Amino acid sequence: MNTNNSFSFSRDNLSVLKIGSAYFTTPVANDCMASLHVGLVLPDVQSFKTDDSILPGYQSPYWGAHNTRVVVGGGNCCDGYLIALNDEGKVTKILAIDFNIRRIVPIIYSVPATEPEKGETTKLGLLVSGAGCSGKGARFVDFNRVTPTSTPVITTEEEVVSYNSWLYGSDPLKVADIWERLEKIGIKADKERTAMAIKVFATF
């Protein structure tokens, strides 16, 4: 993925900075669980010249009252949180995850359109991975729902990748059968579009 120099974390890992200025501070009271470690920046609609090859008619996901711009995750003990933020640094979605989040990967997938004659609709999902006292592995996160969901893709019990590898940011897409695993939980992922998204979604 691309790195994005506009966004960074404060020294205590409790805030997101945008060009060095405060953008967002975690609302979680427990400093250990609240610490932030990884961020994903969604493409700017104006600057991202889409040719409909990634997300047809791309627009920043409507994950809440305002369009989402950044997704951050972290945790440094048992559990962590995945938080979606808009341009003003306000929360559009938040979801607790049963491990410390160390990687966030965009997943482009398809669902049947609300009107059958229109075929399928392309959506953005998130694959997060990490480890902590409460769990490890990878979870598929759907922020498109009114109530966000987290579904295990690689469960805590599986030793597909070591605990330390997950804790230090192992890429879940490098697991050999990851696409089949997504399919088993009902996610019709598009490999090519996902690969393209990874190139334009920046990380920090």
Image: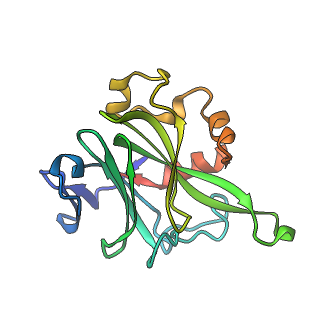
Image point 23% across, 41% down: which residue? 76
Which quadrant of the view contains residue 9?
A: bottom left
Image point 68% across, 41% down: which residue? 183
Say which of 50 and 100 sits in front: 100
Say which of 27 and 176 sits in front: 27
- In the image, residue 132 lies at what x, y percent? 31, 35
Please count the marks in the image: 0
Which quadrant of the view contains residue 133?
A: top left
Position above or below: 86 against 178? below
- In the image, residue 43 lies at what x, y percent? 47, 64
In the displayed image of the protein, which residue is found farthest to the left?
A: 11
Position above or below: 133 against 85? above
Position above or below: 80 against 64? above
- In the image, residue 19 lies at what x, y percent? 22, 65
In the displayed image of the protein, which residue is found farthest to the bottom?
A: 65
Position above or below: 165 against 5? above
| Left or right: where 70 falls relative to 58 | left
- In the image, residue 104 lies at what x, y percent? 43, 47
Colouring convention used in this rendered image of the protein: rainbow
| Left or right: where 4 falls relative to 200 | left
Image point 32% across, 47% down: which residue? 80
Image point 16% across, 55% down: which residue? 10
Q: Is residue 4 visible?
A: yes
Q: Is residue 17 visible?
A: no
In the displayed image of the protein, which residue is found farthest to the right?
A: 117
